[in-house]
Image (cartoon, rainbow, N blue to C red):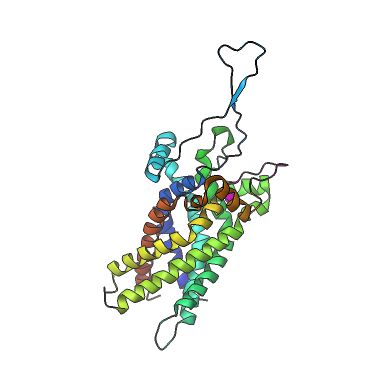
Amino acid sequence: MGVKGFVEGGIASIIAGCSTHPLDLIKVRMQLQGEASGSGVPSQTVRPALASANHVHVQVAPPVASRAGPIALGVRIVRQEGVVALFSGISATVLRQTLYSTTRMGIYDTLKKKWTDPNTMNMPLGKKIVAGLIAGGIGAAVGNPADVAMVRMQADGRLPPAQRRNYKSVVDAITQMTKNEGVTSLWRGSSLTVNRAMLVTASQLASYDEFKEMILGKGLMNDGLGTHVTASFAAGFVAAVVTNPVDVIKTRVMNMKVEPGAAPTYSGALDCAMKTIKAEGPMALYKGFIPTISRQGPFTIVLFVTLEQVRKLLKDF
């Protein structure tokens, strides 16, 4: 298995992940909007003005923050938490891209070279999808601890100050999770992560190659920046449509806070999906789609444009 494909994919993925991290954070916050916090925040006790001493006090639920769009939510985060908050969890993003994306990009590149027809130098779409499914699944299994840490660090700011985890870094997050919740907590939601990663990789990498080959094959553009940007944006849109429902469920399961001796909010992915649909409707599974496509588009463009440039730099190695 060649190391070059892993190095090229890793470099491109880290650059793409860091440059689009604020959009990913906004996406995570939007996906958690409307979710019952299960925080145990006490309701406010209100005593009517004309009530006697024997009257029962009235319990009033604390106000719930209104649901905001991506721009409004981004502005709210900056106002309430500062600009730095947009980069919460970026250390986890670097680790996640190093583990997950380096693995998936490298394995996909290896399978692509192995399965490409030597005569036509083309790889059938079906084989591209299978290669993406395999690469994504393995990469997700490797990178799940960093993924859990990233989601929690990105979501921490929406919790009441007393309930925030306040992880100092991705290492601190993984250490605290292992200490307080056990090693298995690092793979919480791993089935969702694997499923999502398989779908992302199959739809993103396979569709990029397919769109690029189609553009070049029909002579619409030359093999340059224009082709790379067009094919990568189209691939990002396909990936966003395919994976958003799984991403919403994954975010909620990973962000779930499990207290010792208490039943978890969700017993699993299916339970999370059913409760989300029941409480918020089917379209809740596409919550955060605008920031998802806003992030997937630039991420995929930066990823593949950078990848093509890195390949040119390392072509002689």
Residue at the far bottom in the pictured view: 119
Residue 41 image-quadrant placement:
top right
Q: Is 223 left, or right, of 23 in this rendering?
A: left
Q: Is 207 left, or right, of 55 in this rendering?
A: left
Rendered-image quadrant of the C terminus = bottom left
Q: x%, y% of residue 156?
A: 53, 41
Q: Is 285 left, or right, of 269 in this rendering?
A: left
The residue at the point 32 percent across, 66 percent down is 230
The residue at the point 69 percent across, 44 percent down is 263
Q: x%, y% of residue 165?
A: 58, 40
Q: Is 179 left, or right, of 162 in this rendering?
A: right
Q: Nearer the viewer, residue 52 or 81?
A: 52
Q: x%, y% of residue 54?
A: 67, 13
Q: Nearer the viewer, residue 220 or 55?
A: 55
Quick check: 90 above or below 129?
Answer: above
Residue 38 image-quadrant placement:
top right
Residue 69 image-quadrant placement:
top left
In the image, is residue 233 part of the stretch drawn in magenta? no
For residue 171, say whether it is visible: no
Quick check: 288 above or below 109?
Answer: above
Q: x%, y% of residue 261?
A: 73, 42
Number of on-image labels: 0
For residue 47, say whether it is visible: yes
The magenta segment is 252-263
Quick check: 305 above or below 279?
Answer: below
The residue at the point 57 percent across, 29 percent down is 61
Quick check: 63 above or below 11?
Answer: above
* Main secondary structure of the magenta stretch: loop
